[in-house]
Amino acid sequence: MSNVDVVVTGLGATTPLGGDVASTWDAMLAGRSGVSTITAEWAEQLTVKIAAQLKVDPSEVIERVRMRRLDRSEAIALIAAKQAWADAGLEGSEIDKERLAVSLGSGIGGALTLLNQDDILEQSGQRKVSPHTVPMLMPNGPAAWVGIELGAQAGVHAMASACATGAEAMALGLDIIRSGRADVVLAGGTEAVIHPLPFAGFANMRAMSTRNDEPEKASRPWDKGRDGFVFGEGAGAVVLERAEHAKARGARVYARLAGAGITSDGFDIVQPDPECKGGARAMSRAIRDAGLTGADIVHVNAHATSTPVGDMGEIVGIKAAVGTHPVLTSTKSMSGHLLGAAGALESIATILAIRDSVVPPTINLDDPDERLDLDVAAHKARPLDIPAAMNNSFGFGGHNVALVFTRA
Amino acid sequence: MATRGEITSGLAEILEEVAGVNPDDVAEEKSFTDDLDVDSLSMVEVVVAAEEKFGVKIPDNEVQNLKTVGDAVSYIEANH
């Protein structure tokens, strides 16, 4: 437990469900799916032809010339960060930029640029390769652009922990404020690599759903018919702030980021530990870090990606670390799996669940796996008083991150 | 053979595409960096696009001499 309180004062996102937080949250509460058929020609040759594609293309928000020097993952990170910044009432504010940091990562980084520029190199030679290629593909690019946009001078950090990235970025933000290095941290995750190469790679791992004829039903965590995750793109960002700093400037507070737990499995590069021991340790640490006990956590926004193995392992972990009482959901049933942005978007969903006293639904849970013996808000949003909730994120490589948010 | 005016308007099109420069601001006396706000990376793009458009080769050691739009127009006029 730390004696420095950290609160969330701003939210931003652009997702397959909407171009901002309000529309994304509305879609979640309504149980809408953001998954659709990929219309690009390349999808014809692949076994997976569906994805959770951005509802609002970044080119509708960012001017054309600026887009030329931004990887798609950088563009949407900027969009989400600017929304969060404005939402926190910090636009045009006089806060001390030497006390402002950025913690924002991506699972795969600027691969879209890498692959597109490689095509140009092969077809047209060196001269035609964009001079912006390196800053567009470097994995710290999104964090760096956000840092430049906001003028952050207390450090810019780029996580890379696969599908735990967005959550780990929050955890680092919490550490930075607690350690006294900054008063405000823009924390988040971004991912935008809907391209045949990562699709082919994930498809060949048999990790992705091939329910091509029913895209909206493809992401179905804990359902017997689940056959893999649905690849998504999007970005989420939150403004984390030292509570006293937020209070001094009269900021609106959504929730507290009360605790975080980070562990690693030390087990396998892609397989999750079937008993979720590392995940459970992350959850226990986060709860302890928040000064709570498992009994206090009434809702868990689970990692549950709709893969046959991972979904059930997490259930074992939640029972071990939290108990059998929390109401679960997997918002990935609607948003798809945003990889490095998942933990950021799901943190936002957890924060808004606390604010609005409602658990967003898990859609498509028509025929639950027999081993699912916990309460899930299936099909419909469920009203629930939520003083404290947890968000789990796990990633390839054995990364486990749990975050505990509490009512401010 | 393109006239100086035609080369200038061709460059203006490229500058708009690459760097968002308003074509009305493009004139021979304007400096790429100081007046038109074209940074070094965008200048590389301008040069590559100009080579293609006007069928010229602009070697890297020439680029540093092209301070103004007029410098570029003269080089293209003399070499295409």
Image (spheres, helix red, strand yellow):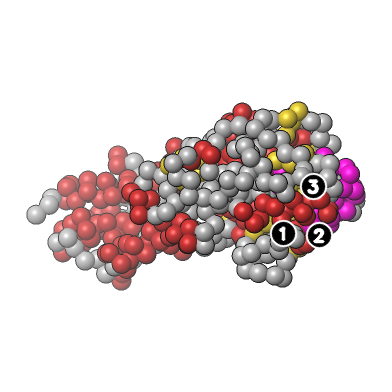
Q: In which quarter of the image is residue B16?
A: top left
Which residue corresponds to the image point at 39% horizontal and 54% vertical from the top-left?
A46
* Marks 2,1: beta carbons within 8 A: yes
The circle drawn on residue A404 is 3
**Which stretch did the figure color magenta?**
A280-302
What is the x, y in percent for residue B78?
15, 62
Q: Residue furthest front?
A: A370
Q: In which quarter of the image is residue A273?
A: bottom right
Label count reads 3
**Is the same chain shared between marks 2 and 1?**
yes
Q: Does the magenta stretch include residue A288?
A: yes
Which residue corresponds to the image point at 62% horizontal and 37% vertical from the top-left?
A366
Q: Which residue bears the numbered disc 2?
A: A281
Count neighbours of disc 2 (C-alpha within 10 A) and say few if under 14, some if 14 to 19, many if 20 or more: many
Tell me how far mark 2 sits from mark 1, CA to CA.
9 Å
A91 vs A138: above or below: above
Q: Which of marks 3 and 2 is nearer the N terminus?
A: 2
Tell me how far mark 3 sits from mark 2, CA to CA.
14 Å
Tell me how far mark 3 sits from mark 1, CA to CA.
14 Å
Mark 3: amino acid: Val
Q: Of B40 and A365, which appears nearest the observer? A: A365
